[in-house]
Image (cartoon, rainbow, N blue to C red):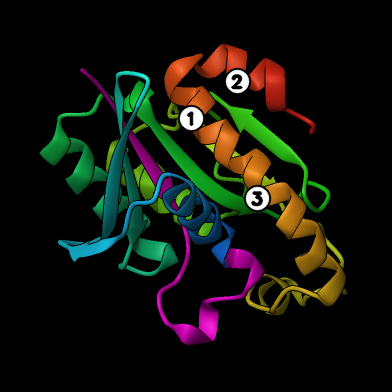
Amino acid sequence: MKKFLIVGLGNIGNAYANTRHNIGFKIVDEVANEYKVSFETEKLGDVASFRYKGRTFILLKPNTYMNLSGKAVKYWMDKEKIPIENILIVTDDLNIDFGTIRIKAKGSDGGHNGLKDIQEKLGTNKYPRFRFGVGSNYSKGRQVDYVLGEWSKEEISSLIERLPTSSKVITSFGTAGLANTMNTFNGK
């Protein structure tokens, strides 16, 4: 049976729960709700799993904080014997308009500390990632405040519409493959 590790990046704790930086957590929470599974706290993160169309999806929310996400990703890849092409890192992206989806097979960390740590721990930048655009509506030098800021009311109402699509990206990745998922969802 094919297994897939879906890693939503974010920071643990109530102070970060509704911040733009935690969109990875929010998306894997949406998937867990849709497939009626609960997260259990395990080593280096909260984990849930479900089966869909003959595949096993393991959802991971690292509890290492964003900047040390690579440790949790590496641990769970090794523990579950999941090849790098079957992992999908779900993260925020300042360089993409709010709500826009971009799936890629590889790429730079784009200045994202979570991706930077994953790249360092895995020894490669060739791993699938799902970037969710959070926009760049901040003034110069205020990037950190923006990503760690809470969603606006307008963004929250749009998120309600975007999260189900994001959930479909996850299952498509495991069933239709990376290339088909990119063709179907990129830019949506």
- Residue 131 spot, x, y in % from top left: 62, 43
Residue 181: assigned label: 2
Q: Which quadrant would the C terminus be assigned to in this image? A: top right
Mark 1, residue position: 171
Q: Earlier in the sequence, mark 2 or mark 1?
A: 1
Give the alpha-carbon distance from disc 2 to disc 3, as whole Å. Answer: 16 Å
Q: Amino acid at mark 1?
A: Thr
Point out the frontmost of discs 2 and 1.
1
Q: Nearer the viewer, residue 157 or 18?
A: 157
Instruction: For mark 3, give the secondary structure.
Output: helix
Q: Tell me if residue 98 comes above or below residue 55 in the rendering.
A: below
Highlighted magenta segment, given as a residue range: 1-21
Point out the frontmost of discs 2 and 3.
3
Let me know if residue 187 is in the magenta part.
no
Mark 3, residue position: 163
Furthest residue toward bottom: 15
